[in-house]
Image (cartoon, rainbow, N blue to C red):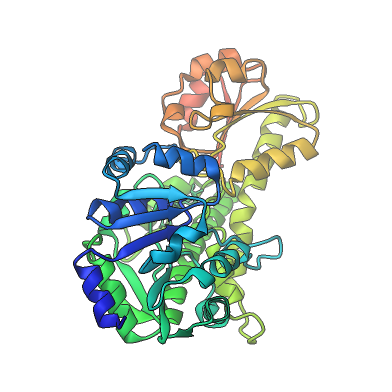
């Protein structure tokens, strides 16, 4: 089948689609493509996730407006079906790959899931199918990893047996569906013609710009846009540390800096977590490994942001000392374990770094998070008898905290505020020893 014919099947929605990897990215993508009328097959390695999806239930917790209802609708309509079996891919015209691409302890990408996916689908690949990698990958990966692997596993040749492209996702937890529809996408084709065929697909679900590009550009844009955000956050965090040292308040400084034209200082905080921002700068850096490019800013920003949970430890030590206590043997309550407010996603959570360090220093830790079942329950009950409460995530449930009740519940009345949920005056009026990121 020529790309013209494939594009025609995409335009009239008769093309049969597959989404491999039904996580935070793949599941919403599969659901919205099914919603516009495509027959969508979801392939997912976790059987319990497959079962839940085929029952029309969303396995994604946290606030995701519209997703559960949409999933139930498209499954009931028979437009989306999930399986663990790659053999079902045999009749698919377009295959989207949304598997994880984490980095390891040495900040190198781990492409095991991506490789396994390509090895698995290759032998089953329908002639002239279009394969689109939506996962975030280091610049050069489509050329150096995906293409050779797919040609080897399918025994077909690029543009003469299959078509290939990279369209990085831009979803954001908490607004997965909205972003899928409203945020522009860079559509990287291995050829300009393939980019056009991909645009024919995304036009059905994206109401924002679809910018045709080559694959390297698509890889660079995705990793650079998140490295950009990481550097911005690191700048805010470094200014926070400066403010603490010189008697300033970074929150006031930030507000006034941002009154200056063309400034947009980000929010300092207790750390940077998630499955995008801590990882993508390293993917960008990996793209130039061994090419003699002196990277200083991107690694430094990562170090600043990774250091923030450890700075929280310093604030804790200082407050405990004022109360005549030390970390050793203290019982500390960590409020928030997800990486982001109103989410159950704890990937690369700054709280995990904090908890590990506090245990190393001999403290006992109680964790609370209203979005994570094992850490749920009544907050004041959980932190009763603790020597400090540390706010690590700006969950709405913490904004409304009764500080007087907090003081009564704690054994040592200390509040360390990693996300500026409170003002010092409020906390001190409630009898709390108060410390805050970025405020002397
Ligand atoms: N954070 C700060 N200060 C800030 C912003 C975030 O400390 O000013 C922290 C958050 O607490 C969190 C981490 O950084 O721990 C990441 O927060 P995030 O708002 O960037 O949320 P993510 O990780 O879901 O980022 C995603 C990204 N989207 C994609 O990769 C498709 C990112 O590009 C988006 O900019 C971001 O969502 C968004 O704007 O919501």
**Does residue 139 lie above or below 258 as drawn?**
below
Give the number of callouts.
0
Q: Nearer the viewer, residue 391 or 116?
A: 116
Q: Position of residue 62 (x, y in %)?
A: 43, 37
**Does residue 84 lie above or below 186 as drawn?**
above
Q: Position of residue 415 (x, y in %)?
A: 58, 28
Q: Is residue 132 left or right of residue 3?
A: right
Q: Position of residue 256 (x, y in %)?
A: 36, 53
Residue at x 46%, y 81% (from the top left corner): 216
**Does residue 160 lie above or below 302 as drawn?**
below
Q: Is residue 242 left or right of residue 399?
A: right
Residue 197's image quarter? bottom left
Q: Is residue 135 left or right of residue 415?
A: left
Residue 206's image quarter? bottom left
Residue sitting at the far left = 12
Q: Quadrant of the C terminus?
A: top right
Q: Quadrant of the N terminus?
A: bottom left
- Can residue 97 be spotted in the picture? no
Q: Nearer the viewer, residue 49 or 226?
A: 49
Q: Nearer the viewer, residue 170 or 440?
A: 170
**Does residue 176 lie above or below 396 as drawn?**
below
Q: Position of residue 165 (x, y in %)?
A: 41, 76
Residue at x 61%, y 41% (from the top left corner): 351
- Can residue 355 be spotted in the picture? yes
Residue 289's image quarter? bottom right
């Amino acid at each position: 089948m020529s790309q013209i014919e494939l594009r025609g099947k995409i335009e009239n929605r008769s093309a049969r689609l597959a989404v491999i990897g039904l996580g935070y990215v793949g599941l919403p993508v599969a659901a919205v493509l099914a919603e516009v009328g495509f027959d969508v097959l979801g392939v997912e390695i976790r059987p319990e996730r497959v079962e839940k999806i085929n029952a029309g239930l969303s396995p994604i917790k946290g606030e995701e407006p519209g997703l559960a209802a949409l999933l139930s609708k498209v499954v009931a309509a028979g437009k989306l079906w999930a399986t663990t079996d790659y053999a079902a891919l045999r009749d698919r015209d377009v295959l989207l790959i949304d598997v994880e691409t984490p980095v390891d302890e040495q900040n190198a990408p781990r492409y095991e899931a991506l490789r396994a996916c390509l090895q698995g689908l290759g032998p089953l690949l329908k002639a002239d199918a279009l394969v689109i990698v939506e996962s975030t990958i280091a610049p050069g990966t489509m050329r150096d990893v995906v293409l050779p692997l797919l040609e080897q596993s399918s025994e077909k040749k690029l543009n003469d047996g299959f078509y290939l492209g990279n369209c990085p996702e831009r979803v954001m937890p908490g607004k997965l569906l909205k972003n899928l529809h409203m945020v522009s996408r860079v559509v990287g084709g291995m050829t300009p013609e393939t980019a056009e065929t991909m645009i024919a697909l995304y036009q059905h679900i994206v109401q924002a710009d679809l910018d045709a590009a080559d694959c390297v550009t698509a890889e660079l844009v995705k990793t650079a846009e998140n490295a950009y955000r990481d550097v911005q956050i690191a700048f805010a965090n470094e200014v926070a540390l400066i403010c603490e040292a010189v008697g300033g308040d970074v929150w006031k400084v930030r507000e006034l800096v941002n009154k200056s034209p063309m400034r947009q200082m980000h929010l300092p905080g207790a750390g940077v977590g998630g499955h995008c921002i801590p990882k993508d700068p390293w993917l960008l850096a990996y793209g130039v490994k061994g090419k003699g490019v002196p990277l200083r800013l991107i690694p430094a920003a990562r170090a600043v942001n990774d250091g923030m949970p450890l700075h929280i430890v310093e604030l804790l030590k200082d407050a405990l000392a004022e109360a005549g206590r030390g970390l050793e043997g203290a019982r500390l309550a960590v409020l928030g374990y997800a990486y982001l407010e109103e989410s159950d996603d704890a990937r690369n959570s700054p709280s995990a770094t904090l908890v590990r360090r506090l245990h190393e220093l001999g403290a006992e830790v109680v964790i609370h998070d209203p979005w994570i079942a094992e850490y749920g329950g009544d907050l004041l009950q959980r932190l009763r008898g603790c020597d400090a409460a540390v706010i690590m995530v700006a969950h709405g449930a913490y904004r409304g905290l009764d500080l007087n009740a907090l003081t009564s519940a704690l054994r040592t009345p200390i509040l360390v505020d990693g996300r500026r949920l409170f003002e010092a005056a409020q906390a001190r009026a409630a009898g709390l020893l108060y410390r805050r990121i970025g405020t002397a």
